[in-house]
Image: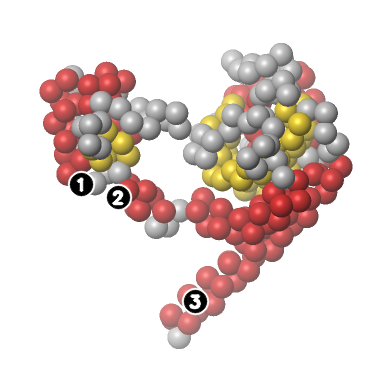
Amino acid sequence: MANSPSGDSVTERLLRVLETFTPTRTVQSASEIGRRAHLPSSTAHRFIGELVETGLLERDEDHRIRVGMRLWELATRSSAALRLRQAAMPAMERVQARIGEHTQLAILEQGEALFLERLSSPDATSNVTRIAGRLPLNASSSGLVLLAYAPAELQERVMAGPLVALTRATIVEPAALRRKLAEVRRLGHALAPGFIEEVATGLAVPVRDPSGAVVAALSVVIARDAAVDAPLAALHRAARDIRVALESRAGGMGRVAASALA
């Protein structure tokens, strides 16, 4: 891709522009995007205009900018995360119907827990997680599961810090985090009371693909003083169901490919 006078490639500028959007900052002015993306004003307005023309960004009636449907369309055409979400949804819905609080699916993405889906009841316990939102790996039950089964190199990098504290209960001491990860692997689940919000407890289990590799974390967020046995049983059952669904989808893809080659 061609470079700008500053040496930035188009790809680098595009990434910086898109990263100015967050789960809580979904609409911005062109000037705000330019400032946050560290682009000169004239460059920002021209570049954003080009992205609007392609449909990657959109303008609303107030001339403010949001992520365009074209970007969503392209991202979901061959997304492994979308296939995982589709395989997980029936099991997640069963957990949500049984527990009635929050049910979430997260994957490991660039050293953080990225949440692909969240199902919530209207009167459920407080929960800060958002779809397409991220949390530090040490600060949630999902993150603990993902980190516990992550490569040793990533574990050491995370424990080297800094470890972010969201509440007084969040683990921020490397030795304590190491012990917690060993506990997660021994028990097969993570329990995180008050790690994100004082009033809530996160419970998470690993989701495995047909090969046995951990590809996601399935979690519920419940009241801090709620019993955990029933939610954990529902999560473990759902994780097994998701693995079966992934195996079925993998088999179906293989049959389609064989048919195409016949």
Please name the residue shown 49% across and 39% down the image: 132
Task: Please name which of the two marks, 2 or 3, marks the residue nearer to the observer.
Answer: 2
Task: Please name which of the two marks, 3 or 1, marks the residue nearer to the observer.
Answer: 1
Given the image, on which type of amino acid does mark 1 rest?
A: Thr
Locate residue 187 relative to residue 55 in the image: left or right.
right
User: Is any part of residue 31 visible from this angle?
Assistant: yes
Compared to residue 259, the image places residue 195 above or below, namely above
Distance from the alpha carbon under mark 2 to that under mark 1: 8 Å
Read off the residue under disc 3. Answer: 256
Quarter containing the N terminus: top left
Distance from the alpha carbon under mark 2 to that under mark 3: 28 Å
Task: List x then y, in percent, for residue 45.
Answer: 16, 28
**Other-residue count near label 3 (Cα within 10 Å), few / some / many at <14 / 14–19 / ≥20:** few
Whichever of labels 2 and 3 marks the residue nearer the N terminus, that label is: 2
Whichever of labels 3 and 1 marks the residue nearer the N terminus, that label is: 1
Could you tell me which secondary element the residue under label 1 belongs to? helix
Task: List x then y, in percent, for residue 193.
Answer: 77, 26
Task: List x then y, in percent, for residue 5.
Answer: 14, 23
Mark number displayed over residue 54? 1
